[in-house]
């Protein structure tokens, strides 16, 4: 068609040298890949390294200092006293073990609830129901932490809503204590377990369930021999949250834990009186979580995340 | 549409071709407003290689899933060797399935996958191991027992899925487009193997496919599905040579469908007639038709060379266009575009279809 020849391309306008400041910086960076990488990572790595890792290191250093028992002043020194104290004093040992036990109980409770719910949402529910439940699960994440803890405090209060609800059955609620704490923590961290388990369930093809049933499995054995092994990575991922968040919590323990002491409450009560001891105790949950991650990695589940 | 169930020969050498392995009567399946299968009757004989053939959405997979027990029927009954299994769960039915995506358990080894059904039946370990080894031998993959499914090729997964289903020695094996995911060469090889294995084990195979060539190659009998109904049941030869409906005639291979004036010239009535392209031959114009032959003068419009055959499009005086498929053998006539020819074929290949 002749039309093409009638409109020649506009002359050299596009090739004019561009020389704004931005252009010059871009040109310099283009030639220097290392500078480019530094510019990209400076802010996030600085934030992570200095503020986060740095404060952890400071915490660890403080754990070796000591407090003058008369003036309550912190004296920089190098002593293992704080660590010896938390290892040898039975009250600290029991608190550490109790906290780990509570965190494990919370994790098991979350997993036990997430399994049937995930199965229902991923394989049974209609799309509408599925969306409603997904919102329902994540909704608590949008509410303030204190609001949620306080509403559980009201729920468990003596003569409160739970007691009133159970009264017709001749029962009463557990009251403030370890059971109330486990239930409250399980409520708080449930979304972190339910979401990965539900997602993993969705990724299991329906045909695997059909095949299992076809080969002679009843629903229960299909869940145990097919679903649970395939959901293992999701359970591990969820448990990292439920376990470590439970291990570090102290506010819920103060509100609904009654007399139950956990690592967090012990740290909180020492933070002013004896910061080095608090710091030493603060390393315990970190070590436990590191150990937990190591075991999770060894099980091979982290690779599939 | 019910097939006769006359027993053929005493069950000595041949796998018992007597009695119905599967019998569906007035089976209907609805998903909400949509009816996937409408009031279906079908009998499948014991020991048969039976295919359910049809385009996607024709209801064939739904029928298979109802026989397996994955989908409950909306109404009707399903009998397995005379026993009503309509309301039984999959694990209570003596049928096993090879799935389209193979559905191998990704966290179990090949041996554990194949032994899964036996383990559920609490078969002793020694016997289980022996039968797993036998099953892997049967599909000629004894060397992969310790591997995970992800470490197998598509064809190997397909065979493991087959071994896993056959190890339970079901009365009926259901295969849901099992070769669909394989490339053409592997598919043809697996077709031969499937047929051999079926002959060896003598189990009734019900095979779902949308590939007409595959269905014709493998099956003793085929049911052609369309829109939730069965259009025709018969041997591959029945279906190809004597299609009952327009759908069957066009879905299995290509065909010429003529009606009106030309149909009246050929058969005396103007209802729809099917003539396969390879039945028609080109002769010189004016060649007298032999006894019992149809003969129509035509002009060659188009010539397509396809290797072993050449296809001609010829237009007749009645305004119909017929496709002619000639073998490219030594006596092939060299017609060219615009030539006048005489199209001739034995009149017994004119079939009325509805």
Image (spheres, coloured by chain):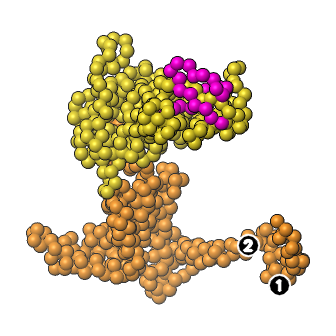
**Magenta region: which residues?**
B274-299
Residue nearest the observer in this picture, A79 or A59? A59
Instruction: Spot the orange chain and give its letter.
Output: A
The reply, left or right, for residue A231 in relation to residue B156 is: left
Residue placed under numbered mark 2 in the picture: A38
Determine if residue A275 is in view: yes
Percent x, y of residue A39: 73, 75
How far apart are labels 1 and 2 at the CA level?
23 Å
Query: In this image, B294 relative to A146: left or right?
Result: right
Q: Mark 1 — on which chain does it sit?
A: A
Q: Is residue A71 above or below residue B230?
A: below
From the viewer's perspective, is the residue at label 1 or at label 2 nearer?
Answer: 1
Whether residue A88 can be seen here? no
Determine the residue positioned at 49% across, 75% down: A279
Residue drawn at (43%, 51%), measured in percent from left and top? A204
- The quadrant of the image that shows the N terminus of chain A is bottom right
Assess whether mark 2 and mark 1 are in contact (beta carbons under 8 angstroms).
no
Mark seen at residue A20: 1
Magenta region includes residue A42: no
The disc placed on residue B266 is none
Q: Earlier in the sequence, mark 1 or mark 2?
A: 1
- Residue B85 lies, in percent from the top left, at 24, 36
Q: Residue at x 33, y 78 (%)?
A: A149
Give the vertical position of A97 relative to B176 (above or below). Answer: below
Q: Nearer the viewer, residue A77 or B208?
A: B208
Rendered hue of chain B is yellow
Q: Is residue B243 above or below residue A267?
A: above
Q: Residue at x 67, y 36 (%)?
A: B300
Q: Nearer the viewer, residue B185 or B118?
A: B185
Q: Is residue B294 magenta?
A: yes
């Amino acid at each position: 068609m002749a039309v093409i020849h009638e409109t020649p391309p506009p002359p050299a306008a596009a090739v004019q040298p561009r020389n704004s400041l931005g252009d010059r910086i871009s040109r310099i960076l283009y030639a220097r890949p290392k500078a480019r990488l530094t510019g990209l990572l400076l802010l996030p790595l600085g934030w992570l390294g200095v503020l986060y890792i740095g404060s952890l290191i400071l915490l660890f250093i403080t754990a070796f200092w000591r407090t003058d028992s008369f003036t309550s002043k912190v004296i920089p020194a190098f002593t293992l006293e704080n660590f010896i104290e938390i290892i040898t004093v039975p009250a600290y040992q029991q608190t550490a073990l109790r906290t780990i036990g509570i965190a494990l109980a919370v994790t098991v409770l979350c997993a036990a609830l997430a399994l049937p719910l995930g199965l229902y949402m991923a394989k049974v529910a209609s799309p509408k129901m599925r969306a409603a439940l997904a919102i329902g699960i994540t909704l608590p994440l949008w509410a303030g932490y204190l609001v949620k803890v306080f509403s559980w405090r009201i729920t468990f209060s003596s003569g409160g809503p739970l007691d009133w609800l159970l009264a017709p059955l001749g029962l009463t609620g557990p009251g403030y204590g370890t059971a109330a704490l486990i239930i409250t923590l399980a409520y708080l961290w449930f979304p972190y377990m339910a979401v990965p388990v539900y997602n993993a369930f969705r990724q299991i093809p329906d045909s695997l369930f059909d095949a299992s049933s076809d080969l002679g499995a009843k629903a229960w054995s299909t869940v145990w021999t097919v679903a649970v092994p395939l959901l293992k990575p999701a359970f591990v991922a969820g448990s990292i949250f439920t376990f470590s968040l439970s291990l570090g919590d102290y506010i819920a323990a103060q509100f609904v834990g009654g007399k139950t002491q956990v690592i967090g409450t012990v740290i909180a009560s020492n933070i002013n009186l004896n910061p080095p001891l608090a710091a030493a105790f603060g390393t315990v949950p970190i070590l436990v979580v590191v150990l937990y991650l190591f075991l999770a990695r060894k099980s091979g589940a982290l690779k599939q995340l | 549409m019910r097939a006769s169930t006359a027993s053929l020969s005493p069950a000595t050498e041949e796998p018992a071709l007597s009695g119905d392995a599967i019998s569906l009567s007035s089976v209907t399946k609805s998903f909400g407003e949509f009816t996937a299968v409408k009031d279906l009757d079908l009998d499948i004989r014991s020991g048969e290689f039976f295919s359910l053939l049809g385009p996607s959405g024709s209801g064939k997979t739904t029928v298979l899933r109802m026989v397996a027990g994955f989908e409950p029927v909306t109404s009707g009954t399903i009998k397995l060797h005379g026993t009503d299994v309509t309301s039984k769960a999959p694990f209570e039915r003596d049928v096993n399935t090879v799935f389209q995506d193979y559905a191998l358990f990704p966290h179990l080894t090949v041996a554990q996958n194949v032994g899964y059904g036996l383990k559920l039946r609490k078969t002793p370990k020694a016997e289980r191991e022996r039968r797993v080894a036998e099953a892997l031998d049967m599909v000629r993959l004894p060397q992969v027992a310790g591997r995970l499914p992800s470490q197998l090729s598509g064809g190997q997964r397909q065979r493991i899925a087959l071994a896993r289903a056959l190890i339970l020695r079901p009365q009926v094996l259901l295969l849901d487009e099992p070769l669909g995911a394989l490339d053409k060469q592997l598919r043809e090889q697996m077709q031969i193997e499937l047929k051999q294995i079926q002959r060896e084990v003598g189990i009734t195979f019900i095979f779902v496919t949308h590939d007409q060539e595959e269905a014709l190659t493998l099956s003793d009998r085929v049911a052609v599905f369309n829109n939730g109904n069965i259009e025709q049941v018969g041997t591959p030869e029945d279906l190809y040579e004597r299609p009952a409906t327009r759908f069957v005639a066009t879905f299995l291979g290509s065909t010429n469908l003529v009606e009106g004036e030309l149909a009246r010239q050929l058969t005396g009535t103007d209802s729809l007639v099917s003539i396969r392209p390879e039945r028609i031959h080109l002769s010189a114009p004016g060649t007298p038709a032999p006894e019992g032959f149809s003969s129509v003068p035509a002009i060659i419009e188009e010539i397509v060379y396809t290797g072993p055959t050449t296809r001609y499009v010829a237009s007749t005086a009645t305004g119909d266009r017929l496709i002619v498929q000639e073998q490219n053998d030594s006596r092939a006539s060299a017609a060219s575009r615009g030539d006048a020819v005489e199209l001739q074929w034995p009149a017994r290949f004119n079939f009325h279809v509805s």
